[in-house]
Each structure stands twice: as structure tokens, then as C-alpha cells.
Amino acid sequence: MYGDALKILAVANIDITRGGGVLRAIRSIKWYVKNQVKVNLLIPLSDIFYAHSELKDLKALGVSIAGVFKISSITSHAPIFKKTLSDIENILFRRVDFLKLSYKYSPDAIVSLHESTDFVVTAYILSKLFHSKSVSFLQLPPFYGLKRRAENIVRSWFLWNYYMKSLSSSSNIKSKLSVDLIKASNLINREIKYNFYKRLDMLIAVSPSIPLEMNVKWNNMVILDPGLTLDREDRSLINKIVKESHIKNRIVLYSARISPEKGVD
């Protein structure tokens, strides 16, 4: 069926409850298979327990599960800087445990379908192991080098806490500390990730805004423009919204998890 077709080992989360990034990763895998790309999949351990239906669907399409990985972290329970410390630990010490990994094939490329460090670091390690090209999609900027964007994320974080957690005016001291922590976290993130992500053979940004927000111009980065299209499910959802709500204006639909890190513009 595949002959001399491209063979990739995709590192991806397929638990659909994790948000829009997973939805787009699954759609990408299905598109690869449809276009005769041989896809082997490496998934995080949690997917074995929480992504039964997704695993069944992908296997039915011919996707092979090449293995399972787990990130060992000593900073995951840190009182502050939890995410930042975890990212630094992933990049510097690369504590990836492969609980199961097949060596029966030689992939042309190792592709991380997410920009988070646990997936990118795993893909990078595998590229060295298999002597393959290392590729990562950037669905979001891994760090923010644009000052205005970083400031908007701080604003968004405050709005999130105000409306979702009823942050009172008596929390000014706590809020000021939180702002300083967020700014420091972004600075550390930018410094530690800047040098690592440049090592990959290719970064694929799904929007021109990503390198803009990172404030970088790298030779290993290509930009998809437009990076996202409307799938059949998206069009169906838009039609349903228009029909049931009688909205006559144009609709912008973006399938994604709501989080303050997305920022406010």
C-alpha cells in the first residue's frame, strides 16, 4: 500500500478531552493516512487509559502504535513556577521513559504534533535514536518574545482570575506577586527554549503570527498560511449555530480549550 511513501513516527496526544490541539493532531494524522503517509504513533501513557475510542479509530485507519512514553519529573509538584521548572527539566535533563517502543522500522522523520516541551523533547530524543529528521508543529508559540503579547497574557490572567475565581480587591499583594512570577516565568521560558527549539531540523508554524509573537526569524521554521482550514465538522457546527441562534453576522470558529495563556488582544 505504502511502497516508497513517506514514513513518520508521530509523537502526539490523542485524548480528545485535552483540547483543540489534540483535535487538530488527530485530524492531521487522518490526513496523512489519507494521503498515503505511513504513520506510526507514540503516545503518552495517559492515553492508554483515557483515549480508548480514539485509539480504536486510528488503528482502524491503519495507524500503528509504535510505543508509549512517560515524562519523569521531580518539579511537577513545585509550589511556584511548576510549568516553567518542568519545561526546563525536560530540556536540560530529558527524563523521558519509553515504556514500549518498536524498532522494527526506520522512520524518515520524527514529528511532534504539539509545541509543548514534553512532546518536542521526546521527538528530539527519538530523532537521535533513529537517525531521522526532527520536526515539530507549533500550534502556539512555545514562548513569547513580543513584549506586547506577553503583557496581554498577564492582563488575560487577571481577567481569568477575576471572573473565574472571584479575585477580590484585598488580594492586591498576591496579585502583584503573581504578575512578577508570570513575567519571570516567561523570561526564563524564552531563554531556555530559544536555544533548544533552534536545534530541530524543522519547525512548522501553523500561523504567521507564531514567529511574530516569538519575535524570531529562524532558518528552520516554515509557516503555513493559512494554517487552519474548516473541516466538515467545523462547517456543520457553524451551520447549526446559525440555524439555532439566528445569527446573521460572520462567525469565526476556533476549536480550542479556553485558558488565560491564550491572551487578550
Image (cartoon, helix red, strand yellow):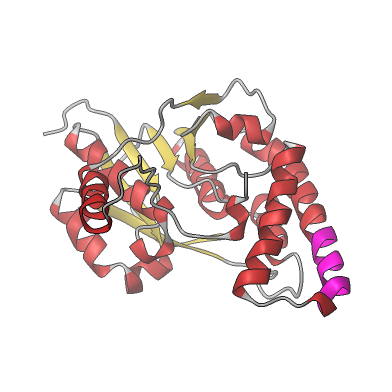
Q: Where is residue 41 in the image (x, y as percent from the top left)?
A: 33, 50
The question of residue 252 being in magenta is answered with no
* Quarter of the image that includes the C terminus: top right
Q: Which residue is drawn at 21% across and 25% down?
A: 4
Main secondary structure of the magenta stretch? helix
Residue in the foreground of this view, choosing between 260 and 248? 248
* Res. 86 visible in picture: no
Q: Residue at x 60, y 73 (%)?
A: 164
Q: Horizontal placement of 207 versus 92: left or right? A: left
Which stretch is magenta? 171-181
Question: How many numbered tags mark residues here?
Answer: 0
The question of residue 175 being in magenta is answered with yes
Q: Horizontal placement of 199 versus 98: left or right? A: right
Residue in the foreground of this view, choosing between 199 and 132? 199
**Residue sticking out furthest to the right:** 173
In the image, residue 183 above or below residue 74: above
* Res. 16 visible in picture: yes
In the image, residue 71 above or below residue 238: below
Q: In which quarter of the image is residue 230?
A: top left
Residue in the foreground of this view, choosing between 236 and 55? 236
Residue in the foreground of this view, choosing between 213 and 96? 213
Q: Which residue is drawn at 66% across and 62% down?
A: 159
Q: Where is residue 237 in the image (x, y as percent from the top left)?
A: 25, 52
* Quarter of the image that includes the N terminus: top left
Q: Horizontal placement of 46 versus 92: left or right? A: left
In the image, residue 72 above or below residue 104: below
**Residue sticking out furthest to the left:** 1
Q: Horizontal placement of 221 versus 90: left or right? A: left
Q: Position of residue 198 (x, y in %)?
A: 64, 32
